[in-house]
Amino acid sequence: MDMDVSFIIVLFAIGIVGSLISGMVGIGGAIINFPLLLYVPPALGFAGFSVQEVSAITAIQVFSATLSGIFVYKKSGLINKTLVINMGSAIIVGSFIGGYGSNFVPDAMISIVYGILATIAAVMMFLPKKNVELNETKDLVFNKKLAASFALIIGIASGIVGAAGAFITVPVMLVILKIPTRIAIASSLAITFISSIGSTAGKLMGGHMLLVPAIVIVIASTFASPLGAIISKRLHTKTLQLILSLLICITVFKIWFNIFL
């Protein structure tokens, strides 16, 4: 695929948007970048990526964006280590299985899996959530077995689409595990980074990673994700939840629209 300057600028812009939102709401950015990478280049007259290529580029974007964002949240004290270790260890196993297994899954099925995950996440975002906001993670109590079980399932499914699973991990934390919003966002970013290691490794082994687009996306993520994390600290928790809900709903509509039509 030819990479002229204008196309690189488009890719950089996509990386900025996805990673900025990644830092704001504790997701890896895949829920934004997957449809953008899939649909925007062809819409602007450039050659399009295959679904396999998009999922591979998205995996490396999530890896770089979450790593950058973690450094900002680490200073806030909102990352719960027990939660990260519990869910992170389970999700990395699942994401590696899903990431490598996706090489044997048809493109159409990858899109369907992505659509199902986004739909589940959208429904969960509108369910009642815990209103109490803890200021310190040491007071956090959650069901460890339930958290690990969900993390393993999320890892397998999200590894297939290279999404790292944060867009469904956050709703699971908020609705099922009853984790306060800011702790969920900060901890999810760390968990997503762990997950992205498995899914990125799986994609690299599958041979679908495109070098130049991956480098452009990584550079954009390095700048944008920390900025998003800084903005997040200044926003009300309800605002953060609303932003994530809208992003998931828009993605659900777009994915299913393209699958059926």
Image (spheres, grey):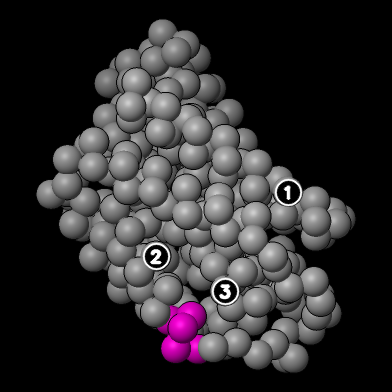
Question: Does label 3 or label 2 sit earlier along the sequence?
Answer: 2
Residue identified by numbered label 3: 176
Q: Position of residue 60 (x, y in %)?
A: 41, 49
Query: Left or right: where does residue 92 sit relative to residue 83?
Result: left
Q: SS class of the residue under badge 1?
A: helix
Query: Left or right: where does residue 113 sit relative to residue 178?
Result: left
Three-letter code for the amino acid on which mark 2 is drawn = Ile
- In the rendered structure, which segment of residues is drawn in magenta? 144-148
Residue 145 lies in magenta, yes or no?
yes
Q: Position of residue 180 (x, y in %)?
A: 72, 73
Residue identified by numbered label 2: 154
Query: Left or right: where does residue 111 sit relative to residue 220?
Result: left
- Residue at point 23%, 42% (across, down): 109
Q: Residue furthest left?
A: 104
Camera-nearest residue between 255 and 18: 255
Three-letter code for the amino acid on which mark 3 is drawn = Ile
Q: Position of residue 187 (x, y in %)?
A: 61, 72
Above/below status of 134 relative to 8: below
Residue identified by numbered label 1: 242
Residue 2 lies in magenta, yes or no?
no
